[in-house]
Image: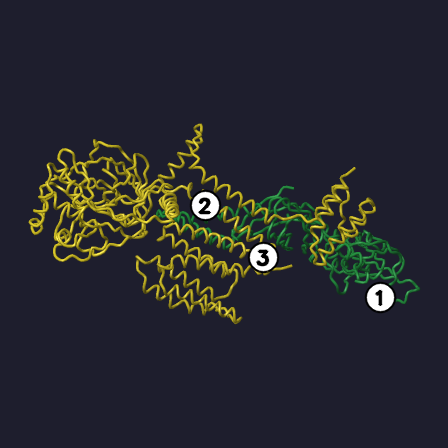
Chain colours: A yellow, B green
Amino acid sequence: MPELRPLKVAWILAVASVVLPGGFLYRDLSPVALLFLGGVLLWIFLRERQGNLRPLGVREQVLLLLPFLLWTILTLRLETLVVRFADLLLILAGVKFLGTRTPRDILQIYLLGLLLLVAAAVWRFDLLYGAIFALETTLLISGLFFLFAAREGEKIPLALARRLALLGVLTTLGVFVLTGFYFLFLPRPQYTLFSGPFGSTGRTGLSDRVAPGEIAALQEDPSVAFRVRWLSGPRPARPYFRVYVYGNYHRGVWTALRKGRGRGARSLPGPRARVEILPQVETRALPVPGYPLEVETVRGPVAEPGPEGTVILKREVLEPALWRLTVALTPFLPAEIPPEDFLRVPRRIHPPLKRLAEGLRRSDPLQTARAVEAFLRRNYTYTLSPGSPSGEPLLWFLFSSRRGHCEYFATAMVFLLRTLGIPARVVGGYAGGQWNPFGGYYLLRERDAHTWVEVWIPGKGWMPFDPTPAPGPLRPSPFKKWRLLWDYLQFRWYYWVVEYDFLKQMRLLRHLAGGLGSRPRLRLNPSRIGLPILVIFLGLGLVACVFFLYRRRVTPVERLLREFSRYGWPRRASETLGEYLERVSRERPDLSPELRTFCELYYQEAFGGHDTRAAQEELLSRILRRLRSP
Amino acid sequence: MKTRFRVRITTAGYLYIALTLAVALAGVNTGNNLLYLCASALLALMTLSGLLSVINLLGLSVRIEPPEEIFAEVPSPFGIHLQARGWPRFFLRVRLFEGESRVLYLRDRCRVLLWVRLPRRGEVLLPPLEIYSGYPLGLFRRSRFWPVGIRLLVYPRPLPGRVPFSVRETVPASSSGARFRQPEPEEFSGLGPYREGIPASRIAWRASARTGALRMKEFEGGGGRTLILDLGPAPSEEELSRATHLILRALGEGYAVGLRLGRREIPPGRGPQKRRQLLEALAHA
């Protein structure tokens, strides 16, 4: 009977359970730890091939670990505490790999792998963590199955090992289901005792400072900055998400208004929309698609209305956060600071602009603004790399290069209008974004960061204008749909796992309680239920496949014995198959030739190594037919 | 048969629980949902591990087959018949007293042999049979107990050596007179299970091979040499042990053996019936 050493399988799985989270965190971990682990594994591989691997004793392991321990202590800082801890875990695992391979040692390696996964949870929140979590769980559970088998016996039959592997996978599936249940329903407190610095993934390309001349070339960064989930209300075709209003221009630099609270105008015309904002970057202000009427902080630093229809945060957001806003989608925004404050033009650029601006003056501010916008769009070219300006950046753009990015265009329009006595200001935020139909949200990437202009139209309010000509059409990506799907999965991961909190739990429980208490209303939307049904069917199909592949097939001999026993001919414990069939043949002489042949076929299979299973099946069917026939 | 369960946490289990609590506490303290996720997974595995360990011990039926003769402090083979209904069972351990055996995989039915050493002679009520397993992960050890409810008579421990009581040996005139020489037994009475103290020449090898258990040829008859043991009214444990050994040896060599125990007197004889009678008398003494 072929046999297998479960300890060997458990050891291989233990190595994988350390390498997997280690590989996942390779960007964050120290190269020393990674190199050490890689070197150890390579050394073990080469030594095992040569067949002269000698395990290190405990004293040797401690001596090997000691310098790394000292290095960890010496380089320990509060902000890198978790990372250093993960480094140490990786090194410890490497040292353990070099030691003996008893079940106890392997159990300790599993523990190190698990701790690495837990450590990764402190600073990696993306969907990839979910994938690693699933894989690591599978490895650990399967490994623990084999480790337990190794404690029970040095070698186990291969058939038993296969069953254990299958059980490991099935248990893992069960663990996933139960994990989801516990995660959703385990009571969680509304407030945490302390909140660690769970670092986010990046810094937004948008800042409270805009300096057109300082940036020679912008980069198209596709990383996600925000997700804005559209809960209710009409959705604009190309929304502008306002983040900062830049009021002051000094020596070529715009700075955002930070002081002052919004007056919270509630009587604005226009439809209302309700949105949820999930940040992916470190930020101090939120993108708002209109004018904010209500700001609710669900999780994260408190958000409050800022100056001129912006929403600012009390502190920079570092941890997973979520806000809910009610906004007015109005074409004109109310003024909070007197519009006259947005008329200042630096002295050194006023005279050169005067002549150009006068040529664009029309009968009223609205017409003038439209003329300036059209002038800039027609006569100037949009580029991400305008080069370094010589002298005043704005004058260089308007009269020399005639090429620039959005900051040049917005600055030019603002000062042309201000020169004509029309209040105008630069606004920074995100334009357009990408609508994700799977999740019902706008995906705002770094490359969507944009600046545009708001012009004061007397009697109406601040009206947005975008003087930046549209860049060339983007090439449609063949993977766009898949990317959107991936982002949707990321969003779901963030929404239901990373951002899941007390309030969501309460809402879910209330929803379930409502569903149980009231008569269910059948509102099936085929497009919404299609995917879950497909997933359920695929899952059931998979389970059925596994069942049919691994089900224990009853052999013809077992079937014959079972059937004959029902007819009153049980086999005695002392009888061989031949003796038994001979006895049955004496009682049913008509079956004698078939039974003798059957016995012969069985012996050929059992002791001769011939595959006679099909012939046995066929003959058994014949015997049973004859037995049943009166 | 009413059974009961018991669970014991292993060292690895304690470590696992501590880790789960630590991760859960970290999750609650920091509000980090991924730590919650890890804690949930650890908890889920703990739950499933407990559930699987119960399922592994459910649907089992047990039948105990005690040996024909049990001597105190001598390992005796107890046959345990296990039958599993429905699903397969993994890594079971069967225990009775300190006798323990393991079953790696049980799909339908199997028989395991437990070598049980009972400590004292006399009537013994067998303790519950324990089947336990650390399956699936070894974090917990779950046991299930089957009350056996079998009363057994344990014979004194056979102890070789000089006998401290009087032994009367009578030899027929035709015999040469040598002590304990093998005489020719008179009458073959059938096959019986192997018993302690029987010479290997009496083993019926063919029948043993067919049945899978040692069988021996039984003889009966009252002729030949006779040995009568007189133990007095209150024999000590050592005397009983030595008497047991002597009886087994004498019967094995074809003697007709008799016993005097205070007022009780058992006339000399051979064969399994006589052997049982003699040993029972010693066990109850």
Question: Horizontal placement of A604 versus A275: left or right?
Answer: right
The answer to whether marks 1 and 3 sit on the same chain is no
Q: Check the picture and name the quadrant holding the C terminus of chain A.
A: top right
Q: Do callouts 3 and 2 point to residues on the same chain?
A: yes
Q: Chain of mark 1?
A: B
Q: Quadrant of residue A2?
A: bottom right
Lateral position of residue A214 relative to residue A34, left or right: left
Residue A28 is situated, as x and y percent measured from the top left of the image, at 35, 59
Graded by Cα atoms within 10 Å as few (under 14), some (14 to 19) or many (20 or more), the crowding at tag 1 reads: few
The one nearer the camera, A578 or A223, is: A223
Q: Amino acid at mark 1?
A: Arg
Which residue position is annotated with label 1?
B179
Q: Is residue B72 left or right of residue A42?
A: right
Residue A140 visible in the displayed image: yes
User: Does residue A485 lie above or below B104 as drawn?
Assistant: above
Q: Please give the name of the residue rendered at 12% of the width and 45% of the height, measured from the top-left corner.
A: A416
Q: Which residue is mark 3?
A: A152
Circle 2 residue: A179
Residue B233 visible in rendering: no
Image location (x, y in percent) of residue A501: 36, 42
- Disc 3: which chain? A
Disc 3 is placed on an element classified as helix
Q: In the image as oriented, which residue stretches furthest toward the top?
A: A519
Determine whether label 2 and label 1 are within 8 Å by CB.
Answer: no
The answer to which of A570 and A106 lies nearer the viewer is A570
